Image (tube, rainbow, N blue to C red):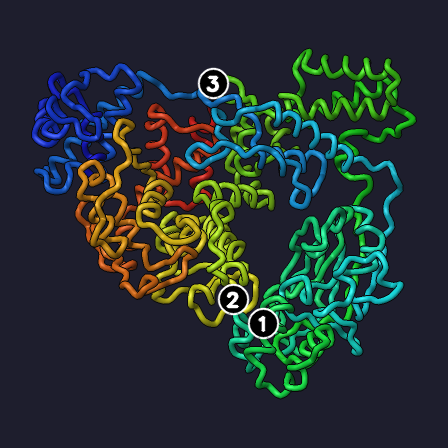
Amino acid sequence: MKHLLTCVALVLVAPLTAIGSDKEVSAFLTNHCVQCHGAKTQKADRRFDRLPITIAKLDDLERYQEIVDQLNLGTMPPEGAKQPSPEQRARIITLLTQKLESARASFKSSHGQSELRRLNSWEYRQTLGDLLGLNVDVWNPAEDFPAEVKAEGFDNNGASLVTSGILLEHYFEAAEEAIKRATHFEEQPVSHHYVQQSPFYFNGKEAEGLPKLFRPDRFRFIPDTSYTDLYGRHYRGGHLGFLPLHQQGGVKQSGMYTIRVRAAALGRTHDYGKALDDFRNGDPVVMEIAAVDRRGSVESTGNVSSMISLARIELTNEEPEWFEWNAYLDAGYEPEVRFRNGPLSAKRLVRMLLTEASDKPEFQPLLNMENKLAQANGVLKAYQGPRLRIWEIQVNGPHIDSWPGVGHQRIYGNLQPEHLNAAAISKRIEAFADQAFRRPPVEGELDPIQQLIQEKLKEGVEPLKALQLGCQAILCSPGFLYLNLGEGELSENALASRLSYFLWSSPPDKTLLDLARAGQLKTELTAQVTRMLADSKSDRFVTHFIRRWLDLDNIGTMPPSEDFLVFYRDNLESAMRAETEMFFRHVLDNNLPLSEFLGADYTFLNRELATHYGIEGVQGNQLRRVELNNSYRGGLLGQGALLTASANGVDTSPVVRGIYLLEKLLGYTPPPPPPDIPAIEPDIRGAVTIREQLVKHREIATCAECHRKIDPLGFALENFDAIGAWRDAYEGNATIDSTGKLPGGDSFNSLSEFRTLMIKRQDQFNRALTEKLLTYATGRELGISDRGELDRILRQFEQSEGGLKDLLTILVESSIFQHK
């Protein structure tokens, strides 16, 4: 790959035969490049002896820039070729940079090339939630939308965001449901207090019509004590329902509720050995509170059609304690208590205890019982292993701060249904459109919607329904669904929208709009960036940018094999994502230098993730900062989310991880194989390890150059398995060799040496991250004509000696950000 980049760099540099007075450049290219990229040979499909002397096209500009990049990276000339002295290299880079800057001045920037783009599913979800005051973390209006097409990993690229007939149907359905959820002409709901004490299972008439979860069976029994024990993580013997809310079909009103549980942890230390399989002796008992929807559920799934995890807490005390959470419950949902890390299912637990622990005296009288119901109940009653013990569950709510909510006010104002007429509806449509469009409607924009409403009224449609149809039409119109930023330099209103969707993924608030309408936003950008990053809505930026930049959604789309039981038992997927997001948030909030991303000697862990990393002394399921002393963790390279996202869920591949590091952290995408060359299956007979296989692969000339650049980066991380756990050997005990040599000649013998070499490439990382941020912020891929402004941004950032927050401020003040 180094050789390929080298060649590319030289290709774009200059016309070999006609560089005019620049004889130094011509001589350099002749001495170092033409042999591989001339008339006889064109490696990597590059030919440098025909470059025009004048940069008249963007393609030429791109080729010149590529050459400079390769010279700067040290990947050209390739290893084994004649090398220029450091002074010669610096001189040629200077000459070519001057030539590029002159060419860019004639091209100007690609300002005005951002596409008229629609909101992607994430932005649509947040926008609808903010506009109508809806909790879209619980109800996702875009859940059934078609998947977005990604460009360079990002799903907000205007050129890729198409609108299909199917998507329009989903928009209409989501708008209808959103208006329904926001509408509240009824009286303010009264808060209720619900209580259920043990037992949580029922027989006889009490059990009629109840789901299995509420009825005894082999693995659930009505206790003769004041508490009920949970034994496993499956719903049979591991979950408890809440009858008072189930009987009324879940909570009647969406809102915040207080959930209290009196509970304790029993039997965390045991002597049952293998009978408990994956429960680590001495671990805390993890209690989970879930919101479940039992409407339309089926027996085989625990009578749950939909579930949302509300909270998890680790219990270590055998004495009962009260635990309390405030959580949002959607209408129709009810709480459920779960033994999150219970050993096995209760069904398998009974079987294992009767076989693997049959020598225990407590089970001796039960071994030969013919009544299997009595036998299973007896085993669980005698069992002294880990249990979650529950005495009582309470629910109080909903807690209403204001009534009706902001969404109702924006649709109806203070009007009651009986006060609606054609004139009132017309005014409400105008007011709602002003909020929904994030700008005043242009002349004639609302005419079709107003005409629709008038036609419906003439047909006898009730005024309330006519108004709702009009608002529904607004939520399906281009003014709501698209970000139309105009042409050229952004207006103040357009800048407010771009800034808000960059940092909040949602519309500008009143402060931004007021500044924009007063023509003062551009002079207040620094203060507004600081204010917006301090707002909790900026967590959306952190979450969504990181997941797109580092492909963290791959953890869910290509989940690890079930062989990695610890990944699921310990809820590592969410912990890994939270680690990376909290790390990024920490760097941002404290305005730390970008070098933290590669060289930090700390991370954010909970007990389960720390155990996975082999780090002792971390307790609890809340992530907190943990110092790493001489650990191979630290920085992005040691984080489980990155390591899992760069694997395939089953095993690791140095090629896949190498490409991942190049693209995500170093800003280089290796070219695909030439289209006219079929995929090659190398002869790997006799090769045992993955390294030996790839050595065979690199013996093929068409594969060698790219793999020379890709493979070393992947091998450096081979000690991490497919879910980021450390290993010293492959399965089968083949020793892992994580040594390598990077393009440019730097060698490393360990992961720590590799990290040191990556830190030496901090400037390359800074450029890559800046490009990713700008791509995300503008909704378009950067072009070669943006390079001059990008270079200026990086120089300004370097001179400021600032941190991540400073970089974001520089970006929003840049010409790239402030032009369409």
Q: Secondary structure at mark 2?
A: helix
In percent of width and height, residue 87 lies at: 12, 38
At label 3, the amino acid type is: Gly
At label 2, the amino acid type is: Arg
Left or right: residue 301 compared with residue 164: right
Give the answer, above or below, for where 387 lies relative to 501. Answer: below
How far apart are the alpha carbons under marks 2 and 1?
10 Å
Q: Which residue is mark 2?
A: 607
> Which corner quadrant holds the N terminus?
top left
Q: Secondary structure at mark 1?
A: loop
Give the answer, above or below, for where 648 lies relative to 782. Answer: below
Q: Furthest residue to the right?
A: 418
Sequence-wise, the earlier of marks 2 and 1 is 1
Q: Are marks 2 and 1 in contact (CB under 8 Å)?
A: yes
Residue 192 shows in this picture: yes
Q: Secondary structure at mark 3?
A: loop
Give the answer, above or below, for where 388 lies relative to 581. Answer: below
Q: Nearer the viewer, residue 584 or 561?
A: 561
Sequence-wise, the earlier of marks 3 and 2 is 3
Q: Are marks 1 and 3 in contact (CB under 8 Å)?
A: no
At label 1, the amino acid type is: Pro
Disc number placed over residue 699 in the picture, else none: none
